[in-house]
């Protein structure tokens, strides 16, 4: 939380590389039925997408005057309403419809609930607001279903569950509404992907916020069977503000997966990477034997930056300067030992002018990343 090509060609194992100009947004065969049935064993497609809570939370997290928190919360609420998640969910669904990834790692999957009148002011500090204002996962799954897409949530981790009073002049008898944010990491799987062994966890090291609560981060993972390939798929979201905390979380993730000998794909918002002054977590993943799918892709010099649009999503043109949404792999060649290393395609979504134009708003403050792994000896396009 932000505090909170296609296969250009594989023939007889020979790659025909392509340039960035060959990819406009995303590039995916339109014959999805063929992709699902004939080619399931020959390719693995994944996506990482930070859904963005919808408003910058830094002013709330950093507020040391607790009497000012309701005002900061009201300011964030106004931005949250303006960034319109139901419309953004249509954009996410359109991206997924175009790509049809087997597995999707989602971060900042928010459940926002409210309660009027506030009972925090009477000393009830436990999160207990129960009236749903926005259910990001439910809304997104509804949009996917409306497009005829079969995706399901197969692993969920709750990171934080906090409630604060928000200044609300419409509330009576006191002008405060309690606003509760529950933040999740989620893995979605396509309907033809079998999953077992779902797992999740919250990192031991969290960010203490002056506002009076800790910002926790976590991970989710599943064993996924795509055709005859089995892969451990993990999604994570690391701390953004303090690099020492972020690095501790990355190292914990590395240790959690250290004994895994099967192919692993780890995706997520690492808040670390090329173009950012925080690079230790990115470098730690590489030192632990993880390859960066973006740098393994052929024929492109595109930076692949994914962060960030304006906090209110009002910028007319993209200005991404940091690559922090990443796809890492380890032992990926073991998915098809006979063909060895796969051809890897990777591209970004949600960072081109047409992405904003189509729905009138950027889908998120981040771009997403799609990666496809193709094994030349299995199946044919």
Image (cartoon, rainbow, N blue to C red):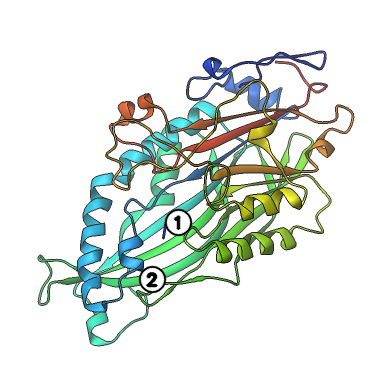
Classify 10 Å Cα crowding around label 2: few (below 14), some (14-19), many (20 and above): many
In the displayed structure, 93 sits above or below 82; it is above
Q: Is residue 12 visible?
A: yes
The answer to whether residue 371 is above or below residue 288 is above
Q: Residue at x 77, y 29 (%)?
A: 342
Please identify the quadrant where the N terminus is shown: bottom left
Residue 123, image quadrant = bottom left
**Tag 1: Cα neighbours inside 10 Å, few (<14), some, or many (≥20)?**
many
Residue occupied by mark 1: 1
Return the x and y of residue 94 as percentages of the image width and height.
43, 31
- Residue 143 at x, y percent in the picture: 40, 38
- Residue 47 position (above or below residue 110): above
Marks 1/2: CA distance?
A: 14 Å
Q: Which SS class for mark 2? A: strand
Q: Which mark is residue 304?
A: none
Of residues 4 and 45, which is closer to you in this image?
A: 4
Q: Secondary structure beneath disc 1?
A: loop
Q: Which quadrant, please, contains the C terminus?
A: top right
Q: Nearer the viewer, mark 1 or mark 2?
A: 1
Labels 1 and 2: the sequence-earlier one: 1
Q: Position of residue 173 (x, y in %)?
A: 10, 77
Tag 2 residue: 162
What is the x, y in percent for residue 241? 47, 61
Does residue 31 appear left or right of residue 121 in this picture? right
Which quadrant of the view contains residue 247?
A: bottom right
Q: Identify the residue at horizontal 30%, vertical 71% (top origin).
A: 63
Horizontal relation, residue 44 to residue 127: left or right: right
Q: Quick one: which residue is furthest to the bottom in this view?
A: 123
């Amino acid at each position: 939380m932000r505090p909170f090509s296609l296969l250009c060609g594989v023939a007889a194992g020979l790659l025909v590389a392509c340039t960035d100009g060959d990819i406009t947004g995303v590039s995916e065969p339109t014959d999805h039925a063929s992709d699902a049935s004939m080619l399931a064993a020959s390719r693995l497609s994944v996506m990482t997408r930070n859904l963005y809570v919808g408003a910058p939370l830094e002013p709330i997290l950093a507020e040391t005057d607790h009497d000012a928190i309701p005002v900061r919360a009201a300011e964030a609420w106004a931005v949250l309403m303006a960034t319109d998640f139901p419309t953004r969910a249509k954009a996410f669904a359109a991206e997924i419809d175009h790509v049809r990834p087997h597995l999707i790692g989602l971060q900042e999957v928010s459940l926002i609930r409210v309660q009027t009148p506030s009972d925090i002011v009477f000393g009830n500090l436990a999160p207990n607001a129960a009236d749903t204002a926005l259910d990001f996962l439910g809304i997104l799954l509804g949009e996917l279903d409306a497009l005829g897409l079969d995706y399901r949530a197969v692993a969920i981790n709750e990171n934080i569950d906090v409630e604060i009073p928000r200044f609300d002049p419409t509330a009576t008898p006191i002008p405060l509404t309690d606003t509760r944010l529950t933040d999740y990491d989620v893995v979605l799987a396509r309907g033809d992907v079998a999953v077992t062994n779902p797992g999740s966890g919250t990192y031991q090291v969290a960010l203490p916020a002056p506002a009076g609560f800790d910002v926790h981060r976590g991970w989710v993972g599943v064993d996924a069977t795509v055709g005859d390939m089995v892969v451990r798929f993990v999604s994570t979201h690391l701390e953004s503000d303090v690099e020492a905390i972020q690095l501790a979380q990355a190292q914990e993730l590395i240790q959690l997966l250290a004994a895994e000998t099967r192919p692993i794909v780890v995706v997520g918002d690492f808040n670390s990477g090329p173009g950012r002054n925080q690079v230790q977590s990115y470098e730690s993943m590489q030192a632990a034997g993880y390859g960066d799918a973006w740098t393994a892709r052929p024929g492109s010099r595109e930076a692949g930056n994914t962060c960030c649009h304006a906090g209110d999503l009002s910028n007319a043109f993209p200005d991404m300067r940091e690559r922090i949404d990443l796809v890492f792999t380890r032992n990926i060649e073991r998915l098809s030992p006979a063909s060895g290393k796969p051809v890897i395609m990777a591209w970004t979504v949600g960072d081109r002018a047409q992405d904003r134009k189509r729905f009138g708003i950027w889908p998120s403050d981040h771009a997403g990343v799609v990666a496809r792994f193709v094994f030349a000896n299995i199946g044919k396009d």
